[in-house]
């Protein structure tokens, strides 16, 4: 037995048997009875196999139609191979290489089949293909930003590198539908410039939908989005300090820029209506010329653009001019107070100013303001130095003027103006005579008396003190009888004791010179203030 197993012929026979058995096991069909051996091949129908077009010149043509898009295949192969294969393993194509624009009927060919499977038939055998010429057009790349930078920063216009032009290729009938060519960059929360940002260029139609057929060259661009601090453009105001040497004045003052751009936090910029961070010292100027000044950031301002300014200044000999009758305004007075300008009494005053003749020629009284600030002043008289508001490059000659103001608290009552008193009404405090005491011999109108010692009823008159008495009623007195006599307010002659002295400066209005004429109706004065109503006759 051992010799037989070791014999070469026996080994060959055994090997052949084992191989045959192994083949039978592999090809055994489990669906049939174990005694049935599977057949070698089988035919099947494979549906919904995708049809593709190959060889398309995408630069010059676009595939506008491919019909049908899927086909049915009849294949043959071993059952196991057919079962393990999927529809994606079958690739059927239409070759459009070299085709021109238009409609074409092309055969469907096999590009790929699963292993050990044979194609028996294709339904349908041909496909309809429509090609359309492509159009290439240049577009400007638009960069849109989304989001807001941090801390009130602002985004400037994006920059596209290497340039902002790309070429878009589309079917000719779709080119007019292009609405946007560009990219979108997110800058939310950015505080610094976004640099070297590579983005893909997309083509959108007018409805905002992406046009997938578009071919863009270059398809990727580099974008830079400058992020800057908030800024504001404001007028530049150059301040003046010091004073020009005596006899000189500024005729013109021309800065190279009138506006500057300031950078800083937005809440800080909102407070600036102009920028005045620089000054010119006039005390150092003696002749015309150009001055270069640096514009430095002040406060919370981060930067100023431009950083320098040149000022061209023309200096000439100063001239003076008088502006007459300028009104003085008063401010700062409480509502319940009243003020009156005492000096100058008209409330206006002259003012002498000086400056360049070309500047003075354009100035009138409307260009100046004279203001008396009464803030903090109480009732009474006050000397107030005026605040003079002058046009630029004009100054006053001398010191600011001082005015006198009378302030009242508003409680004082105004004194009414004096009324006109009729001639026949005596002054206040003087007694009037009753009708039965009418003087005798009074004629004409009562004139003004110059004597200070004219007696009124009830007043005592000292002897010898009536020098200068006046007879204002026109009573007749003998010549030379005026010594020591005076007249009362009613025009009666009053005899005083001790009237021997001369009548110094006595005036006797309406007096007659007849010495023998009787002076009737005169009341004799008895020295104690009583009046005797008796008729005295002179010899």
Image (cartoon, rainbow, N blue to C red):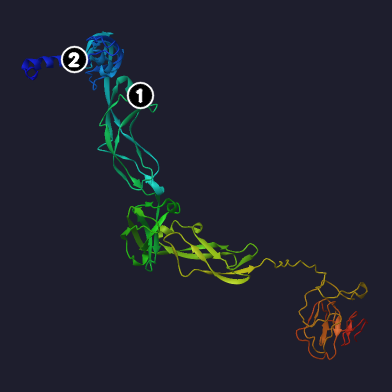
Q: How many marks?
A: 2
Q: Quadrant of residue 12?
A: top left
* Label 2 neighbour load within 10 Å: few <14, some 14-19, many 20+: few
Q: Which mark is residue 177?
A: 1
Q: Is residue 50 left or right of residue 239?
A: left
Q: Is residue 538 above or below residue 245?
A: below
Q: Residues within 10 Å of mark 1 (few under 14, many from 20)?
A: some
- Identify the mark nearer the N-term, 2 or 1: 2
Q: Position of residue 436 (x, y in %)?
A: 93, 74
> Nearest the camera: 4 or 267?
4
Cα–Cα gap, marks 2 and 1: 70 Å
Of the 4 image quadrants, the one containing the N terminus is top left
Q: Would residue 538 be visible to someone looking at this image? A: yes
Tell me where residue 210 appears, x and y as whole percent. 35, 27
The C terminus appears in which quarter of the rendering?
bottom right
Q: Which x, y percent locates residue 168? A: 28, 27
The answer to whether any part of residue 85 appears in the image is no
Query: In this figure, which residue is indicated by the disc labeled 2?
Result: 21
Of marks 2 and 1, the one in the foreground: 2
Callout 2 secondary element: helix
Residue 323 percent coordinates (x, y)? 49, 62
């Amino acid at each position: 037995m051992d010799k037989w197993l070791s014999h070469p012929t026996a080994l060959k026979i055994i090997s052949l048997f084992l191989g045959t058995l192994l083949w039978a096991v592999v090809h055994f069909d489990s669906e049939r009875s174990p005694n049935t051996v599977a057949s070698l091949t089988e035919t099947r129908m494979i549906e919904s196999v995708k049809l593709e077009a190959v060889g398309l010149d995408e630069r010059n043509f676009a595939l506008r139609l491919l019909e049908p898009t899927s086909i049915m295949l009849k294949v043959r192969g071993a059952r196991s191979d057919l079962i393990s294969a999927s529809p994606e393993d079958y690739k059927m194509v239409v070759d459009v290489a070299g085709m021109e624009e238009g409609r074409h009927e092309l055969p469907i060919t096999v590009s790929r089949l699963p292993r050990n499977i044979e194609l028996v038939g294709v339904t349908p055998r041909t496909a309809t293909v429509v090609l359309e010429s492509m159009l290439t057009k240049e577009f400007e790349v638009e960069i849109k930003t989304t989001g807001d930078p941090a801390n009130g920063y602002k985004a400037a216009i994006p920059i596209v590198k290497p340039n902002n032009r790309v070429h878009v290729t589309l079917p000719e009938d779709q080119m007019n539908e292009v609405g946007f060519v560009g990219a979108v960059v997110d800058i939310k929360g950015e505080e610094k410039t976004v640099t070297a940002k590579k983005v893909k260029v997309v083509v959108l139609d007018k409805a905002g939908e992406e046009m997938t057929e578009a071919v863009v060259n270059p398809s990727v661009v580099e974008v830079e989005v400058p992020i800057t601090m908030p800024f504001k453009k404001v007028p530049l105001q150059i301040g003046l300090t010091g004073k020009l040497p005596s006899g000189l004045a500024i005729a013109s003052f021309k800065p190279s820029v009138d506006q500057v751009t300031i950078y800083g936090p937005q809440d800080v910029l909102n407070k600036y209506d102009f920028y005045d961070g620089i000054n010119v010292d006039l005390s150092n100027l003696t002749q015309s010329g150009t001055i270069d000044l640096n514009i430095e950031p002040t406060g919370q301002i981060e930067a100023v653009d431009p950083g320098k300014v040149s000022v061209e200044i023309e200096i000439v000999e100063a001239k003076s001019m008088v502006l007459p009758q300028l009104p003085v305004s008063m401010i700062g007075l409480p509502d319940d107070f009243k003020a009156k300008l005492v000096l100058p009494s008209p409330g206006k005053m002259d003012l002498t100013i000086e400056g360049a003749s070309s500047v003075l020629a354009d100035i009138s009284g409307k260009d100046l303001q004279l203001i008396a600030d009464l803030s903090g002043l109480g009732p009474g008289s006050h000397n107030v130095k005026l605040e003079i508001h002058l046009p630029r490059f004009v100054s006053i000659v001398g010191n600011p003027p001082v005015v006198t103001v009378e302030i009242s608290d508003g409680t004082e009552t105004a004194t009414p103006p004096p009324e006109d008193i009729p001639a026949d009404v005596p002054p206040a405090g003087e007694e009037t005579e009753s009708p039965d005491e009418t003087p005798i011999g009074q004629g004409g109108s009562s004139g003004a008396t110059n004597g200070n010692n004219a007696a009124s009823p009830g007043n005592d008159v000292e002897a010898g003190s009536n020098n200068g008495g006046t007879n204002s009623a026109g009573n007749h007195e003998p010549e030379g009888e005026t010594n020591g006599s005076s007249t009362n307010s009613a025009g009666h002659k009053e005899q005083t004791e001790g009237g021997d002295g001369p009548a110094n400066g006595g005036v006797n209005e309406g007096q007659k010179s007849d010495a023998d004429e009787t002076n009737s109706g005169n009341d004799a004065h008895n020295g104690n203030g009583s009046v005797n109503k008796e008729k005295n006759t002179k010899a």
